Amino acid sequence: RNTFVFMHRPLYSAIFFHKRHTHFTSKEDRDNLIELFKKYKVTTVFSGHEHLYHNINLDGLQLITSGGGGAPFHFYPMGNFYHYLIVKVKEKGVTIRAIPVPEE
């Protein structure tokens, strides 16, 4: 029912999401990958690379950037907190929560 993909670079940059900026060598490469994900009914794509947390649903594809594991943060108005993810898969669906790590 659920297909997860894990990759280092996000399909879209969270920092420049409003411009649909990509970390791929070309937008064509990214768009071809998205079409492949649609074909095989991928439900969620997890990525890192950017040092922040970002979660968005783009045309039914959940895109999660989770890069808040300890490195200095990239500048971004939201998502700058150290965290880990809890992913629960149940009969009724999937829940994904970013859990903040308490500051010392």
Image (cartoon, rainbow, N blue to C red):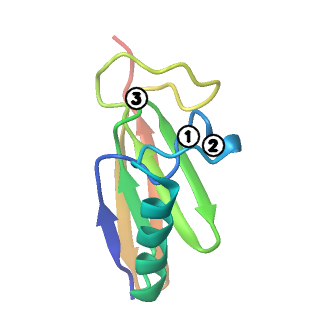
Q: Distance between the residues labelled 2 and 1?
A: 5 Å
Q: Which amino acid does label 2 sit on?
A: Phe
Q: Which amino acid does label 3 sit on?
A: His
Q: Distance between the residues labelled 1 and 3?
A: 10 Å
Residue pictured at 51% horizontal, 66% vertical: 31
How far across and how far down the image is residue 58, in percent? 62, 64
Residue 14 got which mark?
1
Q: Which of 40 and 54 is in front in this view?
A: 40
Q: What residue type is labelled 1?
A: Ala
Q: Considering the numbered disc 3 on the image, is that residue within a helix, a strand or a loop?
A: loop
Residue pictured at 49% horizontal, 62% vertical: 28
Residue pictured at 36% horizontal, 16% vertical: 72
Q: Considering the numbered disc 1 on the image, is that residue within a helix, a strand or a loop?
A: loop
Residue pictured at 44% horizontal, 46% vertical: 65
Give above or below for 98 relative to 42: above
- Can residue 18 be seen by looking at this rendering? yes
The residue at which mark 3 appears reads as 51
